[in-house]
Amino acid sequence: MALVEGGLTISSPAGKIAEVIEAQTTLFTAQCYELYGLPALGSLVRTGDVYGIVASAATVPLEAGRRPVALGHDVATEEAVFRENPQLGRLFRSEFSAVVVGFREGERVYQYLPALPARIHGFVYLCGDEEVRTFSRSLGFLETLLHAVVAVPPEELVSASLRQMSRKHADPDAFLIAAGKMLAHLLSDDYPRLRSILGRLR
Amino acid sequence: MTERLGIVVSASLEGGVVVRLEPGVSVEEMVVGRYVAIQGQRHRFFGMITDVRLEMTDERLASAPPEAGEPLLASVVSGVNTYGIIRVTPMLTIGGDAVTILEGPQPVKTIPAHFSPVELASERDMELVFGQENERNFHIGNPLDMETKLCLNLEEFVKRSNGIFGKSGTGKTFLTRILLIGMLQKSRAVNLIFDMHNEYGWQGTNEAGPPVKGLKQLFPAAVAVYTLDEENSVRRGVKVDSVVKIGYDEIEPDDIALLRQTLNLTELAVEASYQLRRRFGRQWIQRTLELEDAEEVRGLLEETKIHESTFQSLRRGLNTIRRLPFITSHAAEDIVPKILAHLDRGVNVVLEFGRYREIAAYVLVANMLARRIYAHYQAQTEKAMAEGSSPPRPLVITIEEAHRFLNPEIAAQTIFGTIAREMRKYNVTLLVIDQRPSGISEEVMSQLGTKITCLLDNERDIDSVLAGVSGKSELKTVLARLAPKRQALIFGHAVPMPVAFQPVSYDADFYARLAGRKAAGKTEDLEKFW
Ligand SMILES: Nc1ncnc2c1ncn2[C@@H]1O[C@H](COP(=O)(O)OP(=O)(O)O)[C@@H](O)[C@H]1O
Ligand SMILES: [Mg+2]
């Protein structure tokens, strides 16, 4: 159950990782099938035809109001805590919110809000490399992210998504420069913000 | 060549067009004076780059620029948040409507639309505007940083008086020689050159190497060299056609008036010369100088009411003239008809001054000869008009140190002032060369049709050359940034728009090109006359 960056399902890109439990036009929240089965901050996910960028995540008790107690006093490793308390996996849940950044219609991808929000209980997939490359051929989603109203500062969100995406590109530097130019246009009157985002790409 | 430089982001007829450079285009390649073409929606505009500037979208970039450890930031902001701006002064439009298609480039009456693409003017653009090299258009150089030939229509050029300016050593003499050759080959005009420094007739000095060929070496049949200093000319190996001597009796009080400052004469002394001329007739100088007897002098002064000191001052001045070696009491041969005969046949005349380069000699001789030659042209033209016959061949008189003849104090009196003011009434125009144009009267400057100026650094000189030109302040930037040698700005009557250019190299290649053309050109006709 080691947490690999990019999500547990990195080895099986086609597999579903979560299910939508709350959906708005601009945001959807999904619960992971596995505890800690979270996609990394900034990852591109899709439910139905709606694309989102993972914007925040949390692991919380299944029953609201229940507080966990410390269990590791007598064991040597953190893994051992779970080994000796197998029920834990069912008492907690990992969930995340994704900012809606676009949708697809047939072959085409549109980087603006879909007409309808995601559907409840819709399966959420972590997009594979090819899908990420296709999506990020256009960079309009950056503007959506910059203006997203989420708990995470938009600078963090934008830089996390670019870090994620650049890895999937054959020439990550070229991708970052192109995305950087786009940001430079969007932030032409806010150089400190541009600098702070680009500073997080190093 | 047609690489896109940028797009129009703002413009006004008054202030010119502001172009934002494409991210990949280096501001350092945007040289002031260069021509660009702007493809508007309906017109194609030509304009000159007159300013280059760096801009940023956010001032905070200046206070915290990308650091060495931020290569991504640095490459991202360049061209997006930091970018180059050029200011373009539109000069002409071409195409679009019927008028421009029929009549060629038109003055700019509007501005290009937002985001019109801007590129460097192509060779074809330049040809459309300045014309191709042909039997009228002479290749005088290349627009700055361009391979294109810059051609000048010399038939148009000689219709007005023109000026060549620039500090000493900037290339005026070389440029003049090129233009003289152009006129000789491609216009009907014939030239009379007062060659103060012996640069045009046989050969010219060259700071950078061996002497260069003068007109006579290149066009032996079309050029006659006259000299005031035979000994010197012969020593320099010049094939002299005629030696010029000037008799006192050819000098008129008008010539003295012109020399007032040079000879340090008072106004009264000049006035006295007119009185003495009336009194003694053509022999007035000789008679004035020969008066020895004190009684006679007193008699004369009483009769003419000339003051003793005025008289002595005039005599001192006349003595200075008498000491000029080419002055005799009476010249055996009147040189003017001989010059006129050459000019009538289309033979260009260069008058060398040899060693006699003092300004008094130059002003005196040039004024005297020009006055008489002009009188002849005037008579001929009037006769031709009366009889309906063809007027004399257009004459272009070249003078150096023009401010000596055309300064505000004397421009009204000298023949050169008259010629400049009368435009081409009698088929005579001037080519004036000067390193101090601010010394020339404003009125004369305003009459010059085409001006070609090399680098000038004195503010007053720059102002006087550019006075009355539209886009003056922009051209000023261009002029002030010309190279100290062999770059010039041409504007006025004979060119559709101002352009900074590099004159052709005056060298063996140039001679060879001329020779190639000679066979088919007009010099052949001249050989017949000779
Ligand atoms: N068109 C040219 N071709 C070759 N050399 C030139 C040309 N123009 C200027 N030069 C060089 O520059 C020097 C100065 O030019 P010159 O015409 O004598 O200047 P000015 O008459 O303005 O004092 C010349 O001696 C020559 O070496
Ligand atoms: Mg000179």
Image (spheres, helix red, strand yellow):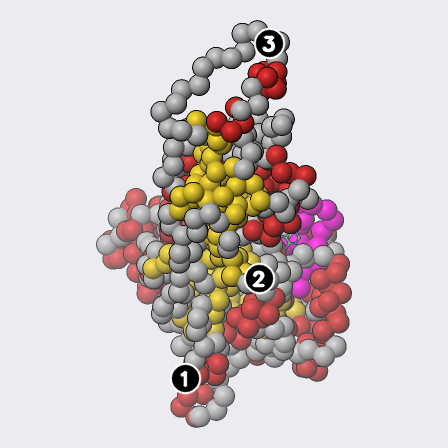
- Residue type at mark 3: give it: Val
Q: Nearer the viewer, residue B342 or A87?
A: A87
Residue A194 in picture, x, y percent from top left: 45, 36
> According to the image, label 3 marks what residue?
A75
Which disc is residue B382 wearing? 1
On the picture, is A34 further left or further right than B459?
right
Q: Are marks 1 and 2 in contact (CB under 8 Å)?
A: no
| Dot 1 amino acid type | Glu
The mark found on residue B9 in the picture is none
Q: Residue at x 23, y 54 (%)?
A: B305
Where in the figure is residue B334, as x and y percent of width and height? Answer: 55, 70
Looking at the picture, which amino acid does disc 2 mark?
Glu
Chain for numbered disc 3: A
Q: Is residue B287 left or right of residue B25?
A: left
Inter-mark Cα distance, 1 to 2: 88 Å
Q: Which residue is under mark 2?
A: A107
